[in-house]
Amino acid sequence: MKVIYAGSFDPVTHGHLDIIFRARKIFGEVIVAVLNNKNKAGLFSTEERLHLLREVLKDEKGIEVDSFEGLLVDYAQEKGISTVVRGLRSNTDYESEYMLAMANKNYGTGLETVFLLSDQNQLFVSSSLAKEVAMFDGDTSLFVPAVVGEAMKKKMRGR
């Protein structure tokens, strides 16, 4: 069974990778779908996020990296996929993700959402915290793979 794990991945973190690998173990195949949100300026462009994800996941089987614009339900329907995976770190995550999951399910497509709880070692990991550490040229290895940390620091120096 193939599932979608969608997000901004700006940047991809160890927490994201944990969810990707666990979803693959459970479902067999995962599309990591980068949302191209034109209303939100991120650190990395969609193309840069795709490049970093492909670099980090280049040796992994059963994982496809793609991007989409618009609604996740439309993307899932276009791909013929009926299940999405979302990671949860806290009850705050649950509340917002639950609302999105119910909207997606009731949108008329029946899109199901499966929640995976973050590994306890990843509870503190977030893209925003990784960006803050990179901004001060700190050690990003707790948060992101080395190639991503270097790209973040290079991007920060260019600002």
Image (cartoon, rainbow, N blue to C red):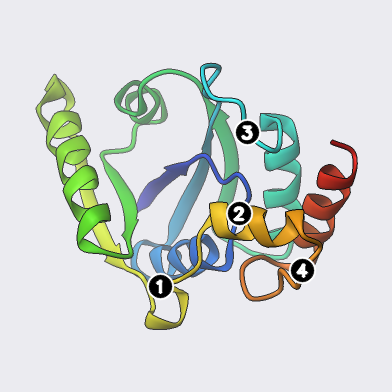
Crowding at label 1, few (<14), some or many (≥20) Cα neighbours within 10 Å? Answer: few
Q: Earlier in the sequence, mark 4 or mark 2?
A: 2
Please name the residue that numbered disc 4 is placed on.
138
Closer to the eye: label 3 or 2: 3
Disc 1 marks a residue whose amino acid type is Leu
Please name the residue that numbered disc 2 is placed on.
12
Query: Is mark 3 in CB contact (under 8 Å) with mark 1?
Result: no
Q: Earlier in the sequence, mark 3 or mark 1?
A: 3
Crowding at label 2, few (<14), some or many (≥20) Cα neighbours within 10 Å? Answer: many
Q: Quadrant of residue 144?
A: bottom right
Q: Secondary structure at mark 4?
A: loop
Give residue 20's position: percent from left, percent from top: 48, 61
Disc 2 marks a residue whose amino acid type is Val
Residue drawn at the location 49% of the way across and 46% of the way down: 31
Does residue 71 appear to the left or right of 29 in the view shown? left
Please name the residue that numbered disc 3 is placed on.
42
Q: Secondary structure at mark 1?
A: loop
